[in-house]
Amino acid sequence: MPIDQPPPPPVEVDLTRVAVVGSALWLVGLVVTTVLALVGTTDWVPAAVCATGVALGGLAFRWAARRR
């Protein structure tokens, strides 16, 4: 394999869609961990982590929408 080949071009990705899907997954995690915390299986730290993921995903969505 020759070493002097140029790298392939970057792949075009819709960052808005990535942010929405990521936020949706964090939201699912938030629902699950909230239910688990309510029934006493776990404490509230995992729910707080998921809530932070949802919030950061929202910020990422706004950032990606501006960069279109």
Image (cartoon, grey):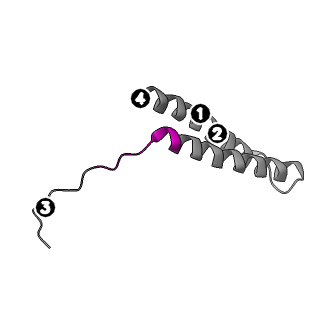
Q: Is residue 18 above or below residue 63?
A: below
Question: Which residue does the numbered mark 3 point to in the structure image?
Answer: 5
x and y percentages locating residue 11 in the rendered image: 34, 50
Q: Earlier in the sequence, mark 3 or mark 2?
A: 3
Q: Earlier in the sequence, mark 2 or mark 4?
A: 2
Question: Which residue does the numbered mark 4 point to in the structure image?
Answer: 67
Q: Is residue 14 magenta?
A: yes
Q: Mark 3 or 2, which is nearer the eye?
A: 3
Looking at the rendered structure, the kind of residue marked 1 is Gly
x and y percentages locating residue 13 in the rendered image: 41, 45
Q: CA distance from mark 3 to mark 1?
A: 40 Å
x and y percentages locating residue 26 in the rendered image: 65, 46
Question: Which residue does the numbered mark 2 point to in the structure image?
Answer: 54
Residue 3, image quadrant: bottom left
Q: Image quadrant for the N terminus?
A: bottom left
Q: Earlier in the sequence, mark 4 or mark 3?
A: 3
- Of residues 3 and 65, the one drawn nearer to the viewer in this rendering: 65
